[in-house]
Amino acid sequence: MSEFMRAVAEHAFMRNALLSGLLASVACGIVGTLVVVRRIAFIAGGIAHSVLAGIGAAVYLQTVHGWGWLDPLYGALVAALLAAVVIGLVSIKARERTDTVIGAVWAIGMATGVLFLARTPGYGGDLMGYLFGNILMVRTSDLWVLGVLDLVVLVSVLLYYDQLMAVAFDEEYARTRGIPVDLFFVGLLLLTALTVVLLVIAVGIVMMIALLTIPAAIAGRFATRLSHMMIWGSILTIVFTSLGLALSYSPGLPAGATVIILSGIAYLLVVMTTTPSGRLRFLPARRRNH
């Protein structure tokens, strides 16, 4: 641990990695809570895997057409938002099953990204880096983008907290209250898309869904209010990303995979030792007074 702290003090890339994990954690805890409560983790996974199409297109345009300003992060953002809109609108307007739509977007996004990368002359990039993340390669310019995305998520949730909570917990009740459920459902998917882009940098496309859902699921075992669940979800994500980065540094392990394993172990321990209401399983139940 001391070696990691020394590296953070001495190397800018380590500070960038730590800061990117912190920035991603804020949106992850907030939006991850809504994803878990609304039970749309599979939709988030579809959005995440479609991101590869935007990354591949950006790399192709950079190399073939000389669009040096087009960062793969921007391509990922466009692809994620587009996938969110497509999944949301088709799910609402069409008669197709939602899982079918998500599966189609998932597969098309991945295949499109692979085709773009395959057609990029002399492409020497590491596809595994996009799939499994490389938080140690985060640049200072990326931190500014992450900060803006974080701000958008925070402001959106603060402005429309009551509506998003109603849509997440009970759509029928929200409709009776006059809330445009379909509009806020698409809005929730757009917020999810922004958070996906934040997490793809930290842990990659494949493992993003675990970090989006696990901290929120752990927080949900103990929190009694949605806002508390968001706060604790963010705190847990900060702990997992920071500790995972620290533990992976000395042995040279992949940081993203270490973060996911750490959070997964924590989740399994919580599930095995507590009830859904957050009580320890080995404690006797309280006796009712008659």
Image: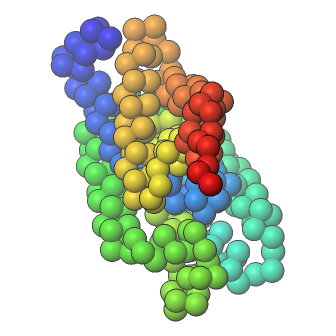
The reply, left or right, for residue 215 in relation to residue 14 is right
Q: Is residue 97 visible?
A: yes
Q: Is residue 176 left or right of residue 187?
A: right
Residue 280: x, y in percent? 57, 33
Q: Residue furthest left?
A: 9
**Relative to the observer, which residue lies in front, 271 or 115?**
271
* Vertical position of residue 280 compared to residue 72: above or below: above
Instruction: Classify the position of the C terminus by image quarter.
Output: bottom right
Name of the residue lying farthest toward the front = 290
Q: Residue at x 45, y 60 (%)?
A: 226
In this rendering, position of residue 221 left or right of residue 134? right
Q: Is residue 7 above or below residue 154?
A: above
Which residue shows up at 42% across the image and 75% down it?
162
Residue 140 percent coordinates (x, y): 25, 39
In the rendered image, the quadrant that contains the N terminus is top left
| Between 145 and 264, the one nearer to me in the picture | 264
The answer, for residue 129, to whether it is visible in the render is: no
Q: How is the image coloured?
A: rainbow
Across and down, in percent, residue 256 comes to: 50, 29
Q: Residue at x 29, y 59 (%)?
A: 151
